[in-house]
Amino acid sequence: MKVHLRLDNSEDADPASRAPLGDMLSAADGVLSAALEKLARPGTLPPAAEISVTLLSLEEMEEQNRLHRGLPEPTDVLSFPLWEEDGEFRPEKGMPVLPLGDIVICPDYVRKNTPTEQAFLEEMALMIAHGFLHLLAWDHDTDERRTAMEAAQETIRRALLDAAAESGKGGVEQ
């Protein structure tokens, strides 16, 4: 299973907010591929999957949060899964590439709530992990599910940070 992370960038998003994310986004394909293989039921996935990640400005994120959640304020991350049915991950069979859905992140919101560049990167890794799990129908609506989701997202977050530190590629792939 190979996951391809496609980065979309809003015209209003601050380009500087992407710069430190390059190594993490470059490493995300491999980390999310490994996570998906561990988390999905065997035999339910095609050889490849795709995730769209969009970085939005504060104003754009506020609009999306208002439209989709009825909350007139920006937030850090929103996820739009394509294969969630009754709280379960039920992907269509027979597709050569499975689009998992969209993760929308507001780096400016994350940055204003983190004191250092390292804390920003750690929180962005958490946003990617959290959004990814929502694409697989994971949720935090009960104590049991919240505990399981927090453990899984911490594993993915740590793997993203470790892979980014090891890759040292720099730059954002688009």
Image (cartoon, grey):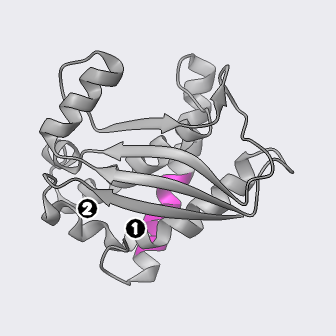
Query: Badge 1 is on which residue?
Result: 24
Q: Quick check: marks 1 and 2 in contact, CB under 8 Å?
A: no
Left or right side of 11 for 167: right
The residue shown at (38%, 83%) is 168
The answer to whether 66 is drawn above or below residue 58 in the figure is above
Q: What's the distance in space between the residues labelled 1 and 2, CA to CA?
A: 12 Å
Amino acid at the residue labelled 1: Met
Q: Quadrant of residue 139?
A: top right
Callout 1: helix, strand or loop? helix
Residue 11: within the magenta? no
Amino acid at the residue labelled 2: Gln
Residue 34, how many percent across, how many down?
66, 62
Residue 111, how many percent across, how many down?
17, 49
Q: Residues within 10 Å of mark 1 (few under 14, many from 20)?
A: many
Q: Nearer the viewer, residue 117 or 13?
A: 13
Q: Nearer the viewer, residue 85 or 87?
A: 85
Query: Badge 2 is on which residue?
Result: 118
**Which residues fall within the magenta stretch?**
156-164
